Amino acid sequence: MSKYTTGEIAKLCGVSVRTVQYYDTRGILVPSELTEGGRRLYSEEDLRRMKIVCFLREIGLSIDSIGQLLSEKDPGSVISLLLDQQEIALKKEIGEREEQLGKLSELKSGLKNIRDFSVESIGDIAYTVTNRQELRRIHTTMLLTAIPLGILQWSSIILWITKDIWWLFLVWIIAAVPYAVWISRWYFRKVAYICPQCHTVFKPSFKEAFWANHTPATRKLTCPSCGHHGFCVEVASAPEEASHA
């Protein structure tokens, strides 16, 4: 039967000698034999055990979990649970990494559009990226609340043209005007703006914001801190800002 030294088993398993020695101290891979000079010797069974340990480490199981698994008389019932837990942990980590990668890509994309680079520029982009999900939620809420009015609008127009029923269109107008005022006030309580000059996050008055020229992501406003008048980036306001608006 073949015998392997620490160096040989380390090479066969693609790990360092120190790793093999560490597994010995943790009781995970104890050598089958010690020579008179104290040299570790490993058997074929030890080699198979080491390969199993290396595989379990590759899929992310901790040393403690591996030690627990290998000490069980019936490891089959334990390994299924450990693998399920590890799968959940890895999926969570992948999700977090993908989110980080997305933020990194957005930061790089934002920096390409900036001529005068500064630390404040990174802060503006980071604030925008962090709040983007909340801003999408706000836009989705607006869209969903507007759907019934949209259905009423087109229904009233069709009935007016085809059936000469005009009063339903009047009902739509009566409902649409107060809705437009309410949803606009709600919206501007939920959002804030970043000044591109002094990087201040501010909330304009309802009148200024309502009538300002705008794009899907910016609005032409006057910064209360530096007086700059131009397009400011729209973001979701912090909860404390929204509650005091």
Image: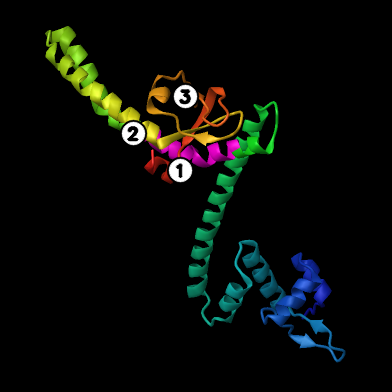
Image quadrant containing the C terminus? top left
Q: Is residue 213 left or right of residue 127?
A: left
Judging by the rendered image, the residue that carries numbered circle 1 is: 238
Residue drawn at the location 41% of the way across and 28% of the way down = 205
Residue drawn at the location 37% of the way across and 32% of the way down = 187
> Where is residue 103, by image quadrant?
top right
Q: Residues within 10 Å of mark 1 (few under 14, many from 20)?
A: few
Spot occupied by residue 140 in the image (x, y as percentages of width and height):
37, 34
Q: Residues within 10 Å of mark 3 (few under 14, many from 20)?
A: few
Residue type at numbered disc 1: Ala
Judging by the rendered image, the residue that carries numbered circle 3 is: 216
Spot occupied by residue 161 in the image (x, y as percentages of width and height):
18, 7
Badge number at residue 138: none
Q: Residue furthest right?
A: 37
Q: Which residues are magenta?
A: 124-141
Residue type at numbered disc 3: Pro
Observer-nearest residue: 75 or 100? 100
> Where is residue 191, by image quadrant?
top left
Residue type at numbered disc 2: Trp
Judging by the rendered image, the residue that carries numbered circle 2 is: 186
